[in-house]
Image (cartoon, rainbow, N blue to C red):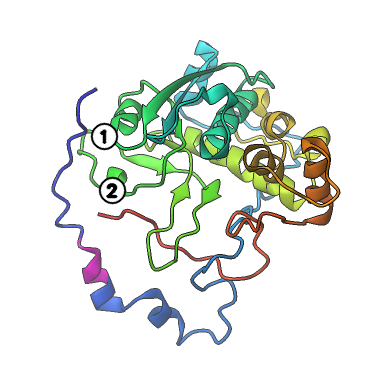
């Protein structure tokens, strides 16, 4: 790979926008008295599943336009890039923590695309410290990228010949102060296929939806059907959760949970799902309970 060339973004002066209209607090304070969730998050739960809407339709729509989903399904493999930290020395197959979560989400995407076949995925690893992973995503060496932080500079500063990148709903939040750039880990896709980006984002949201509704792996049949991506993929959310389980199951598998009375992963996960007990004080990586949910995008140019 070669270095990803960046063009001058001096014209994108975000400070000018703030100078003209003020910050968000200044815009909102005069409009509402009780801002509720519309305040800066300082470490409480951030996960909230955007409602899917009315998906329980008897009529299945024709597939939405887009080239990536047909291409990937024809190849019968989704190419997943995994950004790994410099200190990582293991095999991603048996990995845990951030790398392990990315691995699970890649296989969940494969399960959603291939009627439950979570093994239909090819992994390529990239160092987290450089931009080689974004270069590979840009030139279509990989279809999705996991394990890396959201970095808007690669979106805004990409050369005009590239379409930029789309970042899914985050699946892991760092514990940094809101005054600093909070680390947001998500799945990156190319911005030139909104349908595929939406599909990938639906998989992430599905794991949060499952947790909100008490749906674990064994109850994946309770996930809604989805018609937007065509009849062949109307079980996509069910298939994804049948592999990965809810967000709590993914988190517990990769970070562990020392729940009192738990004697193993399965019992621990089920205890968490039923009681909502959080022994690890997971900070932002829990369901939002109505407290502030706003964070700025990190790494703006």
Q: Which stretch did the figure color magenta?
A: 13-17
Of all residues shown, which one is farthest toward the top? 75
The main secondary structure of the magenta stretch is helix
- Earlier along the polypeptide chain: callout 2 or callout 1? 2
> As drawn, is 289 to the left or to the right of 35?
right
From the viewer's perspective, is 48 left or right of 176? right
Residue at image coords 48%, 71%? 40
Q: Position of residue 189 (x, y in %)?
A: 42, 35
Total labels: the figure holds 2
Q: Position of residue 78 (x, y in %)?
A: 51, 20
Which structural element holds mark 1?
loop
Relative to 216, residue 122 above or below: above
Question: If the image is split into quadrants, where does the C terminus sit?
Answer: bottom left
**Which disc is residue 162 wearing?**
1
| Residue 14 location, quadrant | bottom left
Q: Residues within 10 Å of mark 2 (few under 14, many from 20)?
A: some
Kindly check if marks 2 and 1 are in contact, taking CB atoms under 8 A apart as contact.
Answer: no
- The residue carrying mark 2 is 153
Answer left or right for 257 relative to 89.
Answer: right
Residue 76 is covered by the magenta coloring = no
| Residue 64 percent coordinates (x, y) | 53, 32
Q: Is residue 215 visible?
A: no
Which residue is located at x 35 percent, y 23 percent? 140
For the residue pair 211 and 66, the one nearer the viewer reads as 211
Q: Is residue 265 above or below residue 89?
A: below
């Amino acid at each position: 790979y070669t270095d990803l060339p960046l063009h001058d973004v001096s014209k994108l002066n975000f400070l000018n926008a703030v100078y003209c209209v003020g910050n968000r607090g200044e815009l909102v304070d005069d409009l509402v008295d009780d801002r509720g969730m519309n305040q800066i998050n300082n470490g409480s739960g951030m996960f909230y599943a955007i409602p899917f809407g009315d998906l329980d339709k008897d009529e299945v729509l024709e597939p939405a336009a887009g080239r990536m989903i047909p291409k990937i399904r024809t190849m019968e493999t989704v190419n997943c890039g995994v950004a790994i930290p410099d200190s990582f020395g293991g095999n991603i197959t048996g990995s845990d923590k951030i790398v392990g979560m990315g691995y699970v989400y890649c296989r969940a995407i494969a399960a959603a695309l291939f009627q439950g076949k979570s093994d239909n995925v090819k992994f390529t690893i990239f160092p987290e410290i450089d931009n080689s992973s974004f270069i590979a995503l840009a030139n279509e060496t990989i279809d999705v990228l996991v394990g890396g932080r959201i970095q808007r500079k690669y979106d805004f500063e990409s050369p005009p010949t590239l379409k930029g990148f789309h970042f899914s709903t985050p699946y892991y939040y760092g514990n940094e102060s809101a005054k600093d750039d909070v680390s947001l880990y998500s799945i990156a896709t190319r911005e030139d296929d909104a349908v595929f980006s939406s599909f990938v984002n639906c998989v992430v949201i599905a794991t949060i939806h499952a947790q909100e509704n008490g749906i674990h792996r064994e109850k994946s049949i309770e996930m809604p059907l989805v018609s937007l991506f065509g009849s062949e993929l109307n079980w996509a959310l069910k298939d994804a959760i049948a592999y990965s389980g809810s967000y709590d199951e993914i988190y517990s598998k990769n970070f562990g949970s020392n729940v009192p009375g738990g004697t193993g992963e399965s019992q621990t996960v089920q205890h968490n799902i039923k009681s909502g007990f959080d022994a690890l004080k997971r900070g932002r990586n829990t369901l939002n309970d109505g407290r502030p949910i706003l964070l700025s995008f990190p790494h703006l140019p």
